[in-house]
Amino acid sequence: MSDSDERIRLLFTDVLGLSHGKVVRDSHRDHPTHYAITVMIQGLDLEFDDITNYSVGDGFPDMEARLDPATVRPSWDNGLIAMTNLHFSDGRPLPLCARTRLAEQVSKWRNLGLDPMIGFEMEFFLSEDPALKSGPLNVPMHRVYGTGPGADPSGLLDAIHDAGHRAHLDIEGVNGEFHPGQVEASLRYRDALTASDAAFLFRDMVREIALARGMGATFMARPFDGLVGNGMHLNMSANDSTGANAFADTSAADGISQLCRHAIAGLIEHHTALSALFAPTINSYKRLRPGMLAGYYGTWGLDNRLTSIRIPGQRGSATRIEHRTPDGTASPHLASLGLLAAALDGVERKLEPPAPSAGNAEENPGEVPAVAASLGEALVSLEADQVLVDALGEDLTNVFTTIKRAEIARWEQTVTDWEVTTYGRVY
């Protein structure tokens, strides 16, 4: 027990990538009940989906959120914050726990003598209004890669950067992005589970700090008409048993190893099905369009931002894959899981990628896969992809697709302002 017995927020991630948990005193962090929580399946409408073993038909059983002591850190507000893993009350791991599923995928890489590394690039919009009705933040001095007033005259970004430092989230850089009010933050490159935890916490931190100042922040895939969307680019490599980057090969003309090429091929092989994990909302498909530099086609290239799978120009220890398809609504843990599972499939099957795309890879992509055209199509592709289903597990796949299909059904029955404006005045 610490001398101050600080408050500690124990968080877990649901299948949508949203945070839940309990606040306790640090002295109770190892309480034998492990903070019993109801197992229930809810969508964003808070209605219950009755899925076998997890909801109404089973009497809303207990699950336990068990602290991962390696994740305890200072919070961005007061006290401490930590991640938990989910278990049934008899101690069995809960199949819906995204952290557990990701850890299992990491273990598969480690069984090959490789340690997968991931770095997140997080994009989001700031607004003067928590409900975003005023649009993006007004930035009169806006410029791409702007800093200070050129990125955010409100000072909110400085507060976010400082809070992230206190919370050990290792924000490596913050800058203005393409449109006024849009920001990019790069998080430190590290082992896949730690990196995913940091991205998950970062998203909550940004929104909470903005709200405390009476402002809004959104990682929504494409929140504003006529503006670009918010990506959540995933950078990946793997270290060998000596700690060296196994994606690098100084003897190869392009500087990348055969292992890296196999991983690229695996990502292309599963490109369409990965849509469900990388772009998990209806709105996501308003960002995933050709010409938006958002990772539409299953192409790869050397330092080419018009491909989905980009090999940045740095080599040696910095050699990596950057996947540009994921957006800010993706669960960091499930997006990482999908990335690692698809890449590992390419490695294990020794798949070979096509030649890298040069120039405008969106204009003439050739015979390559594309992302799904909609969330509904993405779910069908996911269910047909046995590699990804095995990585998620049948229970998590079933819960994820059930929640998302209920979300689609609600959307299909919703009358939007656009429909009323377009049709109501003339018919």
Image (spheres, rainbow, N blue to C red):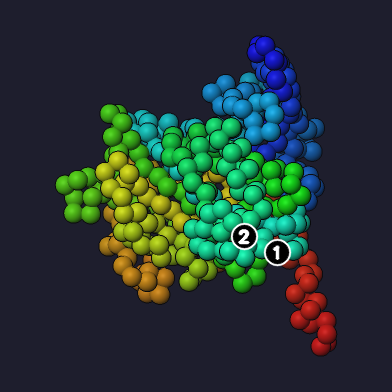
**Residue 76 relative to residue 245: left or right:** right
Quarter of image, res 18: top right
Amino acid under disc 2: Gly
Number of marks drawn:
2
Tell me the SS state at disc 1: loop
Q: Position of residue 284 (x, y in %)?
A: 60, 60
**Residue 364 relative to residue 192: left or right:** left
Count neighbours of disc 2 (C-alpha within 10 A) and say few if under 14, some if 14 to 19, many if 20 or more: many
Q: Which residue is mark 1?
A: 135
Viewer-proximal residue among 287 and 77:
77
Q: Position of residue 340 (x, y in %)?
A: 43, 43
Q: Is residue 244 above or below residue 3?
A: below
Task: Residue 338: tell me if it is visible.
Answer: no
Q: Which residue is mark 2?
A: 181
Q: Position of residue 394 (x, y in %)?
A: 57, 41
Q: Position of residue 192 (x, y in %)?
A: 46, 37
Amino acid under disc 1: Gly
**Residue 298 relative to residue 256: left or right:** right
Query: Which residue is depicted at the point 67% across and 39% down?
Result: 19
Sequence-wise, the earlier of marks 1 and 2 is: 1
Q: Is the N terminus in the top left, top right, bottom left or bottom right quadrant?
A: top right
Tell me the SS state at disc 2: loop
Could you give the CA–CA distance between mark 1 and mark 2, rounded to whole angstroms? 9 Å
